[in-house]
Image (cartoon, grey):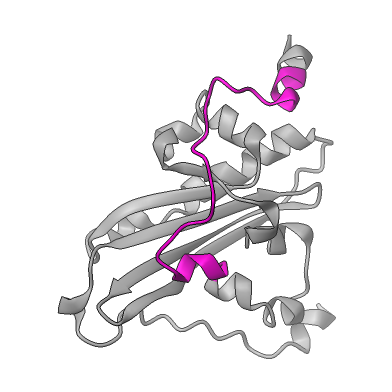
Amino acid sequence: MSGLQNVEPLILPRCYLFGNPNSISPYTAHGFCDSSKRAYAAVVYLCVNTTCGRYVKFLASKTRVAPVAQQSIPRLELLSPLILAVTTVVNVLQDEFDIADTVCWTDSKVALFWITVCEIRKLVPPKHWRHCHGTENPANIPSRGMTASELSQVREWREGPEWLSKSEEPRCVRHDSDDMPAECITEIKAID
């Protein structure tokens, strides 16, 4: 409570379009998710390409406290893609913007594997998911725990990773569902 009382208001500009809307090419939505033993989080950005360049706008974010009952890290890693799939505001915005593509990023290869076999795929199909390095994942920030005043100072959370505002994506490989991470094998054995 004391951290919230002393924090300056966090201002996130909500105007998504600058200049002439006719000079804008199709938009892309990029969502990031992450979890820890403390919390799990998701954050979504809208990438706008114009004739003058590319810019990124914050759309939405959700953070939840991790379940009280002790969970394995692989199970916690599945909570963040689920909250991202639910948070994805693309369906709502589709009527307002021409969103050409949605890309969901996670730094968990375990989660990527399970996405191909669980209910998350009903909300956001596997073809939209990519792996990003943990240090480039803005959902790391709220999932690790941070006061409101600290969060208001973190540019990466408000604006997304630096590479998102450029035309190229980071070095990444689409997930191969045949390449099961060791943690998934361990989790499957625990279920049996």
Tell me if I can see residue 125 in this picture.
no
Q: Is residue 191 above or below residue 132?
A: above
Residue lying at 72% horizontally and 57% vertically, measured from the top left: 143
Q: Is residue 173 magenta?
A: yes
Q: The N terminus appears in which quarter of the rendering?
A: bottom right
Q: Main secondary structure of the magenta part?
A: loop
- Give percent across and percent down for residue 158: 57, 75
Tell me if I can see residue 146 in this picture.
yes
Q: Is residue 164 magenta?
A: yes
Q: Is residue 110 above or below residue 27?
A: above
- Give percent across and percent down for residue 98: 22, 61
Q: Nearer the viewer, residue 162 or 8?
A: 162
Corner quadrant of residue 57:
bottom left
Extent of the magenta region: 160-187
Q: The C terminus appears in which quarter of the rendering?
A: top right
Figure disc tally = 0
* 117 relative to 64 in the view: left or right: left
- Give percent across and percent down for residue 149: 74, 82
Residue lying at 55% horizontally and 63% vertically, measured from the top left: 61
Residue lying at 45% horizontally and 32% vertically, measured from the top left: 121
* 99 relative to 115 in the view: left or right: left
* 21 relative to 64 in the view: left or right: left
Q: Nearer the viewer, residue 188 or 95?
A: 188
Q: Is residue 148 above or below residue 94?
A: below
Residue lying at 30% horizontally and 85% vertically, measured from the top left: 18
Quick one: which residue is furthest to the top in this view?
192
